[in-house]
Amino acid sequence: MSGEKNLAALLKSMKPKHNLGEFVFCKTTHLEQINLSQIIMTFEEESTTIIAKKEVADQLNLDYSYIASWITLTVHSSLEAVGLTAAFSNALAKNGISCNVVAAYYHDHIFVDTKDTKKAMEILNKFSE
C-alpha cells in the first residue's frame, strides 16, 4: 500500500505524536566510527548529517547547535501526496515556529525547537478538528 494521497484526508487524520526526548542534528565525516543503531537518521553527501538523541550525540562528542522535539504524523502518507508539508509548515510558520521535515516511507517527521513543542502539537492537532 502506497499511503494516502488526498490532502483533506491527510490533514484530518494526521494524528501527530510527540516522541519523547531531545534530538539534535550533527555532522560527521567518520560514519564508520558510529554505531548506527544509536542513530535516528542519516543523510547527505558532503558530510553525513545525523539525527540522534541529544544524549547519544553528547556521548559521541558530536557538535550541535539546535535541540529539537520530534513529532511524527502517524497517518500513512504517500510520498506522492501534494500539499501536506506546505499545509502544516505554513501553519507553524504563521506562529513563528521553524520546522525541519523528513518524509519517510510511511510517515512524515517534524523536528521543532523544544521550546515550541506544546504550541506545535496544538497547531497540528487543530487540523483534525
Image (tube, rainbow, N blue to C red):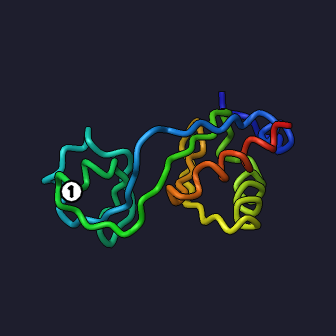
In front of the other: 16 or 42: 16
Q: Position of residue 129 (x, y in %)?
A: 86, 37
Residue farthest to the bottom, as pictured? 46
Residue farthest to the left, as pictured? 33
In front of the other: 17 or 6: 17
Q: Quadrant of the N terminus?
A: top right
Image height check: is 66 above or below 114? below
Q: 127 left or right of 3?
A: right
Quarter assignment of residue 3: top right
Give the residue displayed 40% in from the left and 49% down from the top: 22
User: Which three-letter amino acid code belongs to the residue tagged 1?
Assistant: Leu
Per the image, label 1 sits on a secondary structure element best described as helix
Quarter assignment of residue 4: top right
Q: Which residue is mark 1?
A: 31
Give the residue displayed 77% in from the left and 39% down from the top: 10
Quarter assignment of residue 104: top right
Q: 62 left or right of 109?
A: left
Q: Position of residue 65 (x, y in %)?
A: 37, 69
Q: 90 left or right of 103?
A: right
Q: How many marks?
A: 1
Q: Position of residue 86 (x, y in %)?
A: 74, 60
Give the residue displayed 30% in from the left and 65% down from the top: 27
Residue farthest to the top, as pictured? 1
Image height check: is 46 above or below 32? below
Q: Residues within 10 Å of mark 1 (few under 14, many from 20)?
A: some
Q: Position of residue 56 (x, y in %)?
A: 25, 48
Q: 84 left or right of 54?
A: right
Give the residue displayed 66% in from the left and 45% down from the top: 121
